[in-house]
Image (cartoon, rainbow, N blue to C red):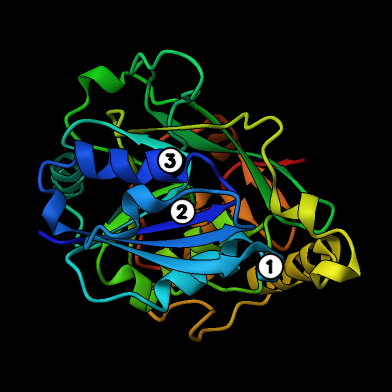
Amino acid sequence: MTIFVSVAAYRDPELVPTVLDCLAKAKHPDDLRIVVNWQHLGDEDVSAVRDDPRVEILDVDARQSQGACWARAEVLRHYRPADWFLQVDSHTRFAPDWDVRCIAAARATGAAKPILSGYPPMYEPDTEFTGAGEPTRIIMKDWTDDGVPTFNQTVVPDWQARDRPFRARFLAAGFLFAPGTFPLEVPYDPTIYFHGEEITLSVRAFTWGYDLFHPVEVLGWHFYIRQDRPRHWDDHGDSETGRHWFARERASRRRVANMLRYPATGRLGMGPVRTVAQYSEYAGVDFLNRTATVDALEGAEPPAPRESAQAHQPELVHL
């Protein structure tokens, strides 16, 4: 089973270790095709993976970068049909046999179009890797002033006793495993800068008929702290490097808020299979009124989505 792996890297010294670990921990590494958007200033050595036929590196001057979603969209311009799709950040570690375990977990959902996603537990490059951690679920946290949801995470309850993934309300961009149709049906919107990436992915995937799940086993680890590591907004705060990052973020949030409140179908919009109203009922969020249900805030597992847009009136909490 072939897997297309998308990696966006912005001046990240963890890029090469991530790619090497992805290959080393896969049971069938020759079935992987890894495409990396390597945004750099010439200060990183990628020679360890550059000549690997399983890896394609898009060589990008970091000063020309337009942000994470732009970088992921550029990767998907190089997409070739595969059985499965994996998107990770360039600071990731993988569980042994992660490839066959992801496929098995996706199949265990029983869904026709399952997505496995979540915030993996943490690793730190400068400390001994123990492989510790627990699988988590994404919960609604709050709303930004412009009406974009923010998220938190808690441990999946009783995950050791579960024999199939936990149904999810929201997706994470840093670990997303999906059928190979996903990049074609839910292409990345390069104009989204930061906030809004995950909620728009969640809604768009759902409206394309994908069912969302959290794995109930640890399939990877993520380096969260990244203190003193360069971020895109650190380098793009003046006109010499192009459009100021905050201007991109402000325009991006307006786009996201409009997309959620006044949805339209289209290549970078919503899908034709389900409606945003059905997603709102399923996930427990109301984009127009900026409310969320108690279940969305606490992370209760939602039932399978109803295919009717007629919804009951759940208990809402104004944040």
Mark closer to the observer (2, 1): 1
Q: Is residue 42 above or below residue 314?
A: below
Q: On the picture, is 80 further left or further right than 240?
A: left
Of the residues under marks 3 and 2, which one precedes in the sequence? Answer: 3
**Residue 301 in the image: x percent, y percent?**
40, 36
Instruction: Report how far apart the C-alphas of labels 2 and 1 lie in the structure.
Output: 19 Å
Q: Amino acid at mark 3?
A: Gly
Task: Please give the residue where the numbered disc 3 appears in the rendered image.
Answer: 118
> Which label was assigned to residue 282?
2
Instruction: Report how far apart the C-alphas of labels 3 and 2 lie in the structure.
Output: 18 Å
**Residue 54 in the image: x percent, y percent?**
22, 60
Task: Say which quarter of the image contains residue 315.
Answer: top right
Q: Amino acid at mark 1?
A: Val
What residue is at 16 percent from the left and 48 percent from the top?
103
Tell which of 290 and 252 is nearer to you. Answer: 252
What residue is at 17 percent from the left and 65 percent from the top?
83
How busy is the neighbourhood of tag 2: few (under 14 within 10 Å), some, or many (20 plus)? many
How busy is the neighbourhood of tag 3: few (under 14 within 10 Å), some, or many (20 plus)? many
| Proximity of marks 1 and 3: CB atoms separated by less than 8 Å | no
> Which label was assigned to residue 200?
none
Q: Is residue 25 above or below residue 63?
A: above
Q: Is residue 302 visible?
A: no
Q: On the picture, is 96 further left or further right than 216?
A: left
